[in-house]
Image: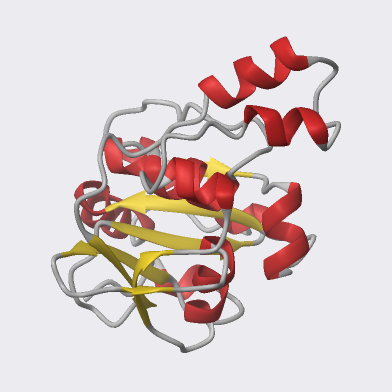
Amino acid sequence: MLQNIPGLMEKGKPVSVLFTREKGEQSSFLYCELIQKARFGESFIIKNQGCKVGAFVLGETETSPEEYYFSTKRYKDRNAAKKAAAGIQRLDKKGSSIKITPYSGRDFDVMVLFLKPERAMRIIQAYAYHSGESVKFMTGGIASICSDCTAYPLSGKLGISLGCKGSRKHSRYGDDEVVVGIPFKLANEIEEALGKIPRTDE
């Protein structure tokens, strides 16, 4: 069971995201809201959720959010909105339900954490410990929890996001928190490195 990674959370627990063949339900909550609820103890198995952008990212629909992004004035024109939507990391296909639970030591595909910047920095340093490689951010300030910190880490890479308007508005995580998505394949290496790298105050 991981201990160093969960120990970086100040409020709540890390969230385990697992793609499963268990029967899931339709939820009216947005994906980011479900993640936040799981952070504080609730558990869900969903087939679908209530966010249109999340539906595109999680493979529930092929309808691009470009029109939504343009109509809400997030971008200067339709071309910019189209390019932004095309750049969103999304699931290749959706053939399963998503189990969203507080981390309990069981298997996960992605672990989502809400961290103060200094503690997110330690995750990055732990990632770099073994190879010296830098973390490359994949974010446009949109679809932060569903894309940046779930779909992107499923490709085997560490996801770091400053958040997005939708997730901060609806799930209300702290203005002083950033979101981190850790794929299962990197978790043990990061866990080990956290026990070896110097503390910030050393």
From the top left corner, tell me how far across and down residue 77 is, in percent.
81, 15
Which image quarter holds the C terminus? Answer: bottom right
Instruction: Let me know if residue 121 appears in the view.
Output: no
From the top left corner, tell me how far across and down residue 194 is, in percent.
38, 57
> Residue shown at 85%/17% (left/top)?
76
Left or right: 53, with 100 as reference point: right
Instruction: Let me know if residue 108 appears in the view.
Output: yes
Using the image, determine if residue 63 lies above or below residue 105: above
Q: How is the image coloured?
A: secondary structure
> Residue shown at 59%/43% (left/top)?
143
From the top left corner, tell me how far across and down residue 84 is, in percent.
63, 22
> Residue shown at 38%/36% (left/top)?
128
Residue sitting at the far top? 79
Left or right: 42, with 59 as reference point: right
Closer to the camera in the image, 132 or 49: 49
Which image quarter holds the N terminus? Answer: bottom left
Residue sitting at the far bottom? 41
Using the image, determine if residue 158 lies above or below residue 43: above
Closer to the camera in the image, 134 or 65: 65
Q: Quadrant of residue 90?
A: top left
From the top left corner, tell me how far across and down residue 37 is, in percent.
54, 80
Closer to the camera in the image, 45 or 108: 45
Left or right: 38, with 11 as reference point: left
> Residue shown at 21%/58% (left/top)?
96
Count the marks: how many? 0
